[in-house]
């Protein structure tokens, strides 16, 4: 499966953005999906994940209550709605996919994912 992340841009603190991750090649409904982010000099970190069923989700503590992950099977796309953005959210955001047989599985570790998108830059100004 090929992943294409988009939607990143410069935004002021307190603002909102919605990132999209479009999957091609195979339906993304077959995959657990995740969002990660990375800043220069640091390891890639988990942000959010959603199970194949679209119901089970998990979030990093730093984004709980502000970010929401969702998926649209008809569009083969996963979204990350980011509200009340903070300068600390500045990073390159990556989407990722992993096949799992159980529809309720969510994955928070980078090494669990098999496919990665190219990343989209989010910059939050103070």
Image (tube, rainbow, N blue to C red):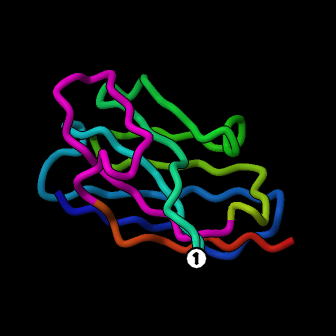
24 relative to 70 in the view: left or right: left
For image coordinates 24% across by 40% down, the residue present is: 31
Q: Position of residue 102 (x, y in %)?
A: 22, 22
Q: In terms of depth relative to the viewer, which is nearer, 80 or 49? A: 49
Q: Position of residue 16 (x, y in %)?
A: 71, 56
For image coordinates 51% across by 32% down, the residue present is: 58
Task: Name the quadrant containing residue 89.
Answer: bottom right
Residue carrying label 1:
41
Q: Position of residue 26 (x, y in %)?
A: 13, 50
Instruction: Provide the secondary structure element on which disc 1 rests.
Output: loop
For image coordinates 67% across by 68% down, the residue present is: 90
**Mark 1, residues whose alpha carbon is within 10 Å: few (<14), some, or many (≥20)?**
few
Q: In terms of depth relative to the viewer, which is nearer, 61 or 70? A: 61
Task: Point out the stretch of residues depicted in magenta.
Answer: 90-115
53 relative to 42 in the view: left or right: left
**Residue 83 colored magenta?**
no
């Amino acid at each position: 499966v090929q992943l294409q992340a988009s939607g990143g841009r410069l935004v002021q603190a307190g603002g909102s953005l919605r990132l999209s991750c479009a999957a091609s090649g195979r339906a993304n409904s077959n995959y657990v999906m995740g969002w990660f982010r990375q800043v220069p000099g640091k390891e890639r970190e988990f942000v959010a994940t959603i199970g194949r069923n679209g119901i089970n989700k998990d979030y990093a503590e730093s984004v709980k209550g502000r970010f929401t992950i969702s998926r649209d099977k008809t569009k083969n796309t996963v979204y990350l709605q980011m509200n009340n953005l903070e300068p600390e959210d500045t990073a390159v955001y990556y989407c990722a996919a992993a096949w799992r047989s159980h529809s309720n599985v969510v994955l928070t570790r980078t090494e669990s994912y098999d496919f990665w998108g190219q990343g989209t830059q989010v910059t939050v100004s103070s």
